């Protein structure tokens, strides 16, 4: 039967156009993300460790992101009914397109299944590589904690790992209950399992927020400690000296920048002991001048993100919080974090 | 949830788990990761499970959609008798098969999925379900001749008057005449049974 092009265009044209747009978006997203992790400077070391697995897992993750966002829209039946019945959607062509909403939902669903498979496989290989290629030089980059850590432990004891496993199981239940045979014979099973999508999205939120392999690329730690009494410093004086010596041995003397401040000026002003020489030369009398400190740190770390971690009374915290939000001329960003034990 | 047939869902799950096991097994064996022989086991177990689960069982009520070409495997699975019919046995079997695959990262998801399938089979067994093979339907031996059973024209063909008119007219006819076959339809031409 010969196809009438006019009929074909009227019946299939817009639908195929939308499908083409959606497909192009997916391909573009996959390609861009793949290239970013394959060639990006900031991922160079991670790429050395993980190889193709990094690129595949991230690229498939961005495709998954897109489709998980889109898949709920065609199922907003009230919204669709409103659009269909209103003056906002005048043309018959658009109305016919809205009829295809369930098909689009299924298309996104199948895409999610396929790319979840790719994502999971790539991450399993990543977990293996993290464990095997563990290097002391890149402790911060590695999700594993030591060489040859059992990759199954990585899977089950990290937030992204555990949420990922649970999501795969939820997806498994949903997919097996969505086949045509089940829908036709036992619609209840399909309906109840499909409502697990809510659980899936909750897990997805956790999965993405816990998936942070490079929180702050630690290049230098500024350790500022303010005490009233000189004796208080003895709590951790030995530990600080050990750290200081360690970094000297490793030829990274400026990795930790220690500054001790003695806020009360009466009484002894030096930590007694020959071995605390390093700390005494880093001891300042009086309170720290936070503004100057922030300016100096901003100047030395232009355009970077600096994490500020405060543990102390609320007066210091307020000052640091305000300074973290303040503008500086070096483009440095300060992220403020606070923890208190009183 | 009265009439849900759990076995059908368990069957889909087991089939999917088999495929997951095969895939994970291929990855593990090809990548030659540590303890890759678990991957080989996974492939073998996966193939066995797929073959066992491919023929769908017959539903209690209504017709069942057969999987493409399942009748050949149905014959084989039928031979196993109670081993394939009883869902308690299947539940235990799947649970047992899933354990070795749990030792390898590449196949551990297959373990989890197969374990879930096993538990749904257990649920099905509790509900007294069992696997019945779908037998091929025998073709009816005799085809009745076309038109062979038609002796008289339809007694009340459309266009039909509404129900009250039919009742009234049938009362009149019963009072007026006797022995006219059928309803109010009066055939203008006498009807003769002609066999063509």
Image: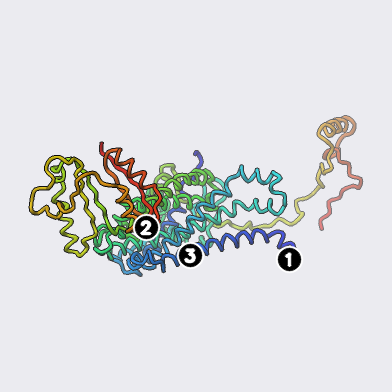
In the image, farthest residue toward the right: B188
In the displayed structure image, the side of residue A309 where residue A116 appears, left or right: right
**For the residue labelled by badge 3, is the local secondary structure a helix, a strand or a loop?**
helix
Q: Which corner quadrant of the image does residue B171 belong to?
A: top right
Between marks 3 and 2 in the image, the one whose residue lies nearer the viewer = 2
Nearer to us in this view, A17 or B118: A17
Query: The residue marked by circle 3 belongs to what chain?
Result: A
Percent from the top left, x then y, of residue B91?
38, 50
Q: CA distance from mark 2 to mark 1?
A: 58 Å
Label whose residue precedes the other's in the sequence (2 or 1): 1
Between marks 2 and 1 in the image, the one whose residue lies nearer the viewer = 2
Q: Quadrant of the C terminus of chain A?
A: top left
Q: Are marks 3 and 1 in contact (CB under 8 Å)?
A: no
Query: The residue marked by circle 2 belongs to what chain?
Result: A
- Here the colouring is rainbow
Label whose residue precedes the other's in the sequence (3 or 2): 3
Label whose residue precedes the other's in the sequence (3 or 1): 1
Q: Are marks 3 and 2 in contact (CB under 8 Å)?
A: no
Nearer to us in this view, A175 or A219: A219
Q: Which corner quadrant of the image does residue A2 belong to?
A: bottom right
**For the residue labelled by badge 2, is the local secondary structure a helix, a strand or a loop?**
loop
Q: Which residue is mark 3?
A: A32
**For the residue labelled by badge 1, is the local secondary structure a helix, a strand or a loop?**
helix
Percent from the top left, x then y, of residue A22?
57, 59
Q: Which residue is mark 2?
A: A304
Instruction: Determine crowd level at label 1: few under 14, some 14-19, many 20+ residues with C-alpha closer than 10 A.
Output: few
């Amino acid at each position: 039967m010969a196809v009438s092009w006019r009929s074909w265009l009227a019946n299939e044209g817009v639908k195929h156009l939308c499908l083409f747009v959606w497909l192009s978006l997916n391909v573009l997203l996959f390609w861009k993300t793949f290239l970013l992790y394959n060639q990006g400077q900031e991922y160079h070391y991670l790429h050395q460790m993980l190889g193709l697995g990094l690129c595949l897992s991230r690229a498939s993750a961005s495709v998954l992101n897109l489709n998980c966002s889109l898949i709920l829209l065609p199922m907003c039946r009230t919204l669709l009914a409103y659009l269909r019945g209103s003056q906002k959607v005048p043309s018959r062509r658009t109305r016919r397109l809205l009829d295809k909403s369930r098909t689009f939902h299924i298309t996104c669903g199948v895409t999610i299944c396929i790319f979840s498979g790719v994502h999971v496989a790539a991450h399993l290989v990543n977990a293996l590589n993290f464990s095997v290629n563990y290097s002391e030089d890149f402790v911060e980059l590695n999700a594993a904690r030591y060489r040859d850590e059992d990759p199954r432990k990585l899977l089950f004891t990290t937030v992204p790992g555990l949420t990922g496993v649970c999501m795969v199981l939820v997806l498994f239940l949903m997919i097996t209950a969505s086949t045509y045979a089940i829908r036709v014979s036992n619609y209840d099973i399909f309906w109840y399992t499909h409502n697990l999508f809510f659980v899936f999205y909750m897990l997805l939120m956790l999965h993405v927020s816990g998936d942070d392999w490079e929180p702050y690329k630690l290049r230098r730690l500024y350790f500022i400690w303010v005490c009233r009494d000189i004796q208080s410093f003895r709590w951790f004086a030995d530990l600080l000296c050990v750290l200081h010596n360690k970094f000297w041995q490793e030829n990274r003397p400026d990795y930790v920048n220690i500054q001790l401040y003695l806020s009360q000026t009466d009484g002894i002003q030096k930590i007694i002991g020959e071995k605390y020489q390093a700390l005494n030369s880093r001891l300042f009398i009086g309170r720290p001048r936070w503004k100057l400190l922030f300016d100096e740190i901003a100047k030395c770390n232009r355009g970077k993100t600096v994490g500020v971690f405060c543990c102390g009374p609320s007066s210091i915290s307020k000052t640091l919080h305000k300074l973290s939000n303040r503008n500086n001329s070096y483009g440095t960003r300060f992220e403020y974090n606070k923890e208190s034990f009183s | 949830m009265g009439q849900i047939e759990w076995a059908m869902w368990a069957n889909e799950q087991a089939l999917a788990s088999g495929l997951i096991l095969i895939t994970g097994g291929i990855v593990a064996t090809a990548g030659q990761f540590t303890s890759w022989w678990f991957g080989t086991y996974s492939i073998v177990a996966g193939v066995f499970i797929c073959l066992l689960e491919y023929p769908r069982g017959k539903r209690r009520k209504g017709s069942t959609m057969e999987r493409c070409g399942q009748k050949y495997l149905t014959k084989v699975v039928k031979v196993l008798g109670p081993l394939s019919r009883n869902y308690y046995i299947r539940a235990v079997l799947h649970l047992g098969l899933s354990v070795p695959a749990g030792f390898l990262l590449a196949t551990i998801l297959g373990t989890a999925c197969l374990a879930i399938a096993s538990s749904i089979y257990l649920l099905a067994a509790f509900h007294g379900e069992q696997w019945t093979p779908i037998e091929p339907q025998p073709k009816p031996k005799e085809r009745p001749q076309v038109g062979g059973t038609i002796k008289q024209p339809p007694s009340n063909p459309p266009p039909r008057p509404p129900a009250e008119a039919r009742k009234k007219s049938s009362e009149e006819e019963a009072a007026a005449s006797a022995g006219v076959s059928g309803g109010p339809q009066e055939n203008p031409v006498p009807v003769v049974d002609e066999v063509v």
